[in-house]
Amino acid sequence: MSRHLSLIGMPGAGKTTLGQALAAYFGLPFVDLDAEIVARAGQSIPGIFAQRGELDFRQLEADTLRAVLARPAPLVLATGGGTPCFHNGITALNQHSITLWLDVPVSTLLARLQAAETAQRPLLSQAPAGLETRLYETLTARTQFYQQAQLHCAGDACTVAALLPRLAAAGFPPPAV
């Protein structure tokens, strides 16, 4: 099976933006896991959280992740922020893809997550102590999973040009069959 490239990190880290750029550069399909979940469930992520709760969402996320990772042709995958942290997600990601952690400071995340966008992120929109506090708490809890990524990219260094040599050294993209 060909290996994929999976981007992990906090909400607002730039997984979708960088993932789309990398997919375009390599001429590979781009997959946004959240979009796959919405298509599979037939409802929005906030709707899933509201009607089914986080536990059901996390199971749906894990099932969808494994279905995407089972695809035979290489692709670039942007995961949800919590994807690596539940149902052995990081293990599945590392087994079937090269994982890249986009490590962005909370101050940058906070600037990127505007109120309108935050409403689409159920765990951030329900932050009683404030968004900044919630981001710090979430990052603290998730770092142990993010650190298991095979590649780590910090802050502004996460550009296509900067990543190309590192991805090549890691064997991405896999050679054409």
Image (cartoon, rainbow, N blue to C red):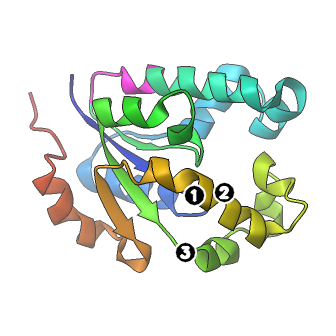
Q: Which residue is mark 2?
A: 138
| Crowding at mark 3 (Cα within 10 Å: few <14, some 14-19, many 20+) | some
Q: CA distance from mark 1 to mark 3?
A: 10 Å
Identify the residue shown where x is 29% and y is 56%: 151
Q: CA distance from mark 1 to mark 2?
A: 8 Å
Check disc 2 and report its element: helix, strand or loop. Answer: helix
Identify the residue shown where x is 64% and y is 23%: 60
Which stretch did the figure color magenta?
67-73
* Badge 1 or badge 3: first in the primary sequence: 1
Q: CA distance from mark 3 to mark 2?
A: 12 Å
Nearest to the observer: residue 106 or residue 61: 106
Up the image or down, 165 lies above or below 151; here it is: below
Residue mark closest to the camera, 1 vs 2:
2
Instruction: Please tell me whether residue 158 belongs to the stretch shown in magenta.
Output: no
Up the image or down, 110 lies above or below 34; here it is: below
Disc number for residue 10? 1
Quadrant of residue 153 in the image? Answer: bottom left
Asked if the residue under mark 2 is in contact with the one under mark 1, i.e. CB atoms within 8 Å, the reply is: yes
| Crowding at mark 2 (Cα within 10 Å: few <14, some 14-19, many 20+) | some
Q: Which residue is mark 3?
A: 105
Q: Amino acid at mark 2?
A: Thr
- Residue 15 visible from this viewpoint: yes
Q: Is residue 83 left or right of residue 101?
A: right
